Amino acid sequence: MKNRIGIVGAPITIAQPNYGVDLGPNAIRYAGLHKRLDGLNVNFKDYGNIDIENVGTNEKDSKTNLKNLKEVVNGNQKIADEIKVIKSRGDFPLILGGDHSIAIGTISGLYNHYKDLGVIWFDAHADLNTGETSPSGNIHGMSLAASLGEGHKDLTSINGEGPKVRPEHTVIIGARSIDEGEREFIKERGIQVYTMRDIEKLGMDTVMKEAIDYLSNRVDGVHLSLDVDGIDPLHTPGTGTPVVGGPSYRETFHAMSALYDSQILTSVEVVEVNPLLDNKNKTAEVAADMIAAVFGEKYI
Ligand SMILES: NC(=[NH2+])NCCC[C@H](N)C(=O)O
Ligand SMILES: [Mn+2]
Ligand SMILES: [Mn+2]
């Protein structure tokens, strides 16, 4: 890693219903993030947390089927602005969430810095819903769709209208809870998805090799969006929408190490750590382990 890592906390919580995901950034810091990065001899600067006003309700808007649209857009606009500042300093952005809606802001902020940005979406979910297809109205389940230009105009217009990433530059890994509308989205738009079945059949090593190969021929930057619910909830119980049957700690650590070895990544975000749902900060500790792996920590 040549660049300095620019760390920022993005504590949006109102794109999902559980209190506490705004505490995620500090929980990951308390889990020893800075020490781990020091141990890797990487240069980093922590810019603290973005000031997010998390005032919302749990009501769906009757027209849009979205909860807290205006507030989620405002928070994500702030995130996009901060990402632009971090990028203009030449830093490698490391964003600590916050619910997964923050990807709308980070990807919008990254948009102008690349001709073709690739995205690796490590998640139990696809986050490809829109107001029309969402079973919940929770915008954290719509952030990949919004980044691909689908969904409410206010969500797709941060830093300019329209798609910020192309479907053929998007790889989802670890999916095992996909809604009906999301399934159609994936088929229609040709998104590369490695479900748990694929991981079981191919093994994580092959999945990562394929994903890295696939993207490196097509893009000039890769953003890793790591939703901790992608990992099996045995290891990451402190998250709002856990789904059993995910990749183990070992497989995930291996996936992160493969990404480090490939040197393909140009930004990383880790989302959905919720210390109020956790057991002695275990989930944030796993998040810190995975961040360490993605920045080069090895067993020997
Ligand atoms: N980022 C997440 N944890 N998303 C969970 C989404 C769950 C469900 N698919 C929904 O749209 O409501
Ligand atoms: Mn998820
Ligand atoms: Mn997600």
Image (cartoon, helix red, strand yellow):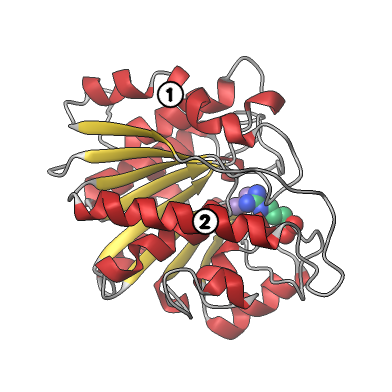
Circle 1 Cα neighbour tier, 10 Å, few/some/many (<14 / 14–19 / ≥20): some
Quadrant in which the C terminus is drawn: top left
Quadrant in which the N terminus is drawn: top left
The residue that appears at 35% across and 53% down in the rendered structure is: 83
The residue that appears at 54% across and 73% down in the rendered structure is: 156
Where is residue 54? Give x, y as percent.
Answer: 65, 43
Q: Is residue 201 left or right of residue 64?
A: left
Image vertical order of residue 88 relative to residue 9, above or below: below
CB-based contact (under 8 Å), mark 1 and mark 2: no
Q: Given the image, on which type of amino acid does mark 1 rest?
A: Arg
The image quadrant that residue 110 belongs to is bottom left
Q: How many marks?
A: 2
Residue placed most toward the observer, 152 or 38: 152
Image vertical order of residue 39 relative to residue 152, above or below: above
Quote the CA–CA distance across marks 1 and 2. 22 Å
Q: Secondary structure at mark 1?
A: helix
Where is residue 87? Give x, y as percent.
Answer: 25, 54
Q: What is the residue that sits farthest to the top in this orientation?
A: 280
The residue that appears at 49% across and 25% down in the rendered structure is: 26
Circle 2 Cα neighbour tier, 10 Å, few/some/many (<14 / 14–19 / ≥20): many
Looking at the image, can residue 202 be seen?
no
Q: Given the image, on which type of amino acid does mark 2 rest?
A: Asn
Q: Is residue 86 left or right of residue 21?
A: left
Identify the mark nearer the N-term, 1 or 2: 1
Query: Disc number at residue 76?
Result: 2
Query: Disc number at residue 29?
Result: 1
Query: Disc number at residue 204?
Result: none
Where is residue 81? Give x, y as percent.
Answer: 38, 56
Looking at the image, can residue 139 be seen?
yes
